[in-house]
């Protein structure tokens, strides 16, 4: 296994983990009865490290699991939290499921479209914000709400959105 | 009204720390359970009438007893913390505010089913709950509670509602896309990595320590004849005080809406979803039902994850169905044809009805497609979509018809 790691880490432009990260990959793989169990956690690592999961990153991760790249590709494309293109520096994901809808999510979404000048699924030209609409984030008691990067932002209004967007550099 | 069991520690700002949990009597149930025979623990949970609180309502002790007695290999305990049912947010509170209650419940459950390695599958979007729970697990290792008979591995999901379905969750845990598996074999016989596995919801396991400490009879006495205990109701939508409320499983839906401050908006109730997005809708005349598993089953709907979404008279039911239909179209995993195709087409049809472009036969077509597909798929996801399709249209048909030209 380690030979292919060494080769990947030296090739320029090819996504590759550091030695410390490779040790972490092996630790994660050892936690599961079958090392493939660590695929989702390692893909999270890959996204944190490379910013998104390119086809090259899929191939690299596949090599760490001795899987065909297609098996990694079908996993990456199945889940919504893996980005296949580089997202903006911040991700604003507005919940649009029922409780948020009842609490005014459509107005929040319209306001963001106007403020950012983009549609859901797009990234601002300056690469600052990727704007998404997403299904229930399970914070319905504080609807309408959104996830901005790692944080849940609750009880949104146009005013709070102004303030939150100011904070995104 | 009823006793506060699950949310007993929430008012303490340090409730997530092991020191606070121990100071409030935490881990006493584990001290007791570790002296008990595994079968005796299962028996106690059976007698308590604890039923799964993630959605299916299956008797927990009975589930535990399905682990084959003669199995010599590993047995896994998998915690379903992939909360995602629209309208539900209770497990988020438990993970953030009482993570040690879950760890203690896991220790006891693991002893009952002779498991030494467990997994907690937390939805990927739950970053703060994951951090809180991870810190608690570390505290439990440092304390010696974990690592001496039970290990906990925390596994983060990556965004997919279907992974809350227990076999979809297991596929995801195994590093695959979250496609549900055909049952039988049930996970208790052949689950994670091919080994006998118990999958339990967060809240379900949090009920276990109080059952061990205070006894099955006490817990059973909090509920109905067929379901013991209290549970956490996530109440949202058009109520004055949307929040998570703990009450007996025997509370009525009307009482629960009153607990949440009553109906907001116009103040006049139109409809309620009693158990998360996948539950059939109830009209304003149908809320004198008890919220236990069997009470809502008899009312033609389900308690599911106890996500209660309230709609006042100003809410458009066709629009509400459109929003849910979009959810099901987006979240269908694509494995079974009836679900993959119907969820997409039904969303398009409800959408065009809401837009004023519905066709005369659309409502009957949706009902026909929904009814034919029910029960034909690998998992319960499509049946969960059919509940709203049929109930919203059948109970509020005239409201849909007014939107359809020449209906």
Image (tube, rainbow, N blue to C red):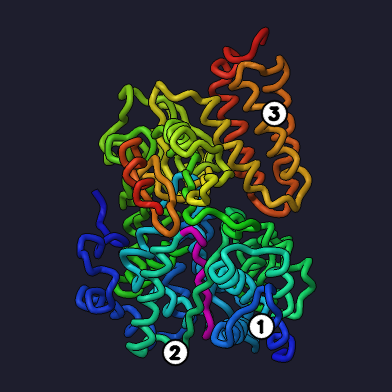
In the picture, the disc for residue B366 is 3
Tell which residue pokes out farthest to the top in this image: B406
Horizontally, residue A87 falls left or right of residue B16, namely: right
The residues tagged by marks 1 and 2 sit, at their Cα atoms, a distance apart of 34 Å
Pointers 2 and 3 within a single chain = yes
What span is colored magenta in the figure? B116-125
Residue at image mark 2: B147
The residues tagged by marks 2 and 3 sit, at their Cα atoms, a distance apart of 53 Å
Mark 2 near mark 3, Cβ–Cβ under 8 Å?
no
- Res B280 → quadrant: top right
Residue B313 visible to an observer of this rendering: yes
Residue found at x 49% / y 56%: A89
Mark 3 near mark 1, Cβ–Cβ under 8 Å?
no
Identify the chain of the residue marked 1, using the numbered disc in the image. Answer: A
Mark 1 near mark 2, Cβ–Cβ under 8 Å?
no
Q: Which of labels 3 and 1 is toward the front?
A: 1
Specify few, some or many for label 1: CA neighbours under 10 Å numbering under 14, 14-19, or 20 or more: some
Q: Main secondary structure of the magenta part?
A: strand
x and y percent of residue B213 in the render? Answer: 30, 74
Which element carries disc 1, helix, strand or loop? helix
Horizontally, residue B141 falls left or right of residue A15, namely: left
- For the image shown, how many numbered marks are present on the structure? 3
Residue at image mark 1: A9
The residues tagged by marks 3 and 1 sit, at their Cα atoms, a distance apart of 54 Å
Horizontally, residue A27 falls left or right of residue B37, namely: right
Which element carries disc 3, helix, strand or loop? helix
From what the image shows, is residue B74 above or below residue B7? below
């Amino acid at each position: 296994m380690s030979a292919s790691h060494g080769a990947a880490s030296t090739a320029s432009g090819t996504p590759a983990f550091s030695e410390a990260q490779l040790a972490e990959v092996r630790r994660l793989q050892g936690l599961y009865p079958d090392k493939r169990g660590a695929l989702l956690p390692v893909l999270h690592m890959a996204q944190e490290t490379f910013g998104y999961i390119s086809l090259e990153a899929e191939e690299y991760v596949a090599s760490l699991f001795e899987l065909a790249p297609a098996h990694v590709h079908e996993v990456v494309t199945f889940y919504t939290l893996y980005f296949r293109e580089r997202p903006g520096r911040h991700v604003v994901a507005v919940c649009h499921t029922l409780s948020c809808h009842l609490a005014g999510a459509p107005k929040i979404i319209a306001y963001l479209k106007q403020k950012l000048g983009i549609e859901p699924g797009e990234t601002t030209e300056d690469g600052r914000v990727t704007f998404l609409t997403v299904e229930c984030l399970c914070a319905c008691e504080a609807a309408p709400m959104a996830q901005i990067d790692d944080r849940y932002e609750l009880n949104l209004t146009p005013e709070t959105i102004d303030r939150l967007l100011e904070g995104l550099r | 009204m009823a006793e506060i069991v699950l949310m007993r520690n929430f008012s303490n700002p340090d409730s997530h720390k092991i020191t606070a949990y121990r100071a409030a009597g935490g881990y006493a149930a584990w001290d007791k359970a570790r002296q008990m025979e595994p079968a005796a623990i299962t028996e106690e949970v059976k007698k308590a009438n604890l039923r799964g609180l993630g959605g299916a309502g299956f008797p927990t002790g009975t589930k535990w007893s399905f682990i084959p007695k003669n199995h010599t290999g590993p047995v896994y305990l998998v915690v379903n913390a992939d909360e995602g049912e629209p309208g539900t947010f209770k497990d988020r509170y438990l993970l953030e505010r009482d993570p040690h209650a879950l760890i203690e419940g896991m220790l006891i459950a693991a002893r009952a089913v002779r498991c030494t390695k467990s997994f907690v599958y937390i939805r990927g979007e739950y970053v703060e709950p994951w951090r809180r729970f991870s810190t608690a697990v570390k505290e439990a290792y440092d304390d010696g509670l974990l690592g001496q008979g039970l290990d906990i591995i925390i596994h983060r999901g990556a965004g997919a509602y279907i992974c809350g379905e227990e076999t979809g969750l297991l596929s995801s845990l195994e590093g695959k896309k979250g496609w549900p598996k055909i049952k039988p074999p049930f996970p208790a016989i052949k689950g994670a990595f091919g080994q006998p596995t118990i999958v339990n919801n967060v809240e379900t396991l949090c009920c276990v320590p109080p059952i061990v400490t205070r006894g099955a009879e006490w817990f059973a006495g909090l509920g109905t004849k067929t379901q013991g205990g209290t549970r956490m109701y996530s109440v949202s939508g058009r109520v004055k005080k949307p929040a998570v409320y703990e009450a007996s499983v025997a509370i009525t839906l009307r009482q629960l809406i009153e607990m949440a401050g009553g109906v907001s908006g116009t103040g006049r109730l139109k409809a309620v979803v009693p158990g998360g997005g996948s539950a059939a809708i109830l009209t304003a005349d149908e809320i004198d039902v008890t919220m236990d598993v069997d009470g809502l089953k008899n009312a033609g709907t389900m308690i599911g994850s106890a996500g209660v979404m309230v709609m006042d008279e100003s809410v458009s039911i066709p629009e509400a169905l459109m929003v849910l239909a979009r959810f099901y179209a987006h979240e269908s995993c694509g494995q079974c044809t009836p679900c993959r195709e119907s969820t997409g087409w039904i969303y398009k049809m409800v959408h065009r009805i809401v837009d004023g472009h519905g066709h005369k036969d659309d409502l009957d077509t949706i009902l026909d497609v929904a009814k034919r597909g029910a029960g034909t798929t690998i998992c319960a996801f499509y049946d969960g979509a059919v509940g709203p399709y049929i109930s919203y249209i059948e109970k509020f048909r005239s409201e849909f018809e007014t939107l359809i030209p020449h209906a």
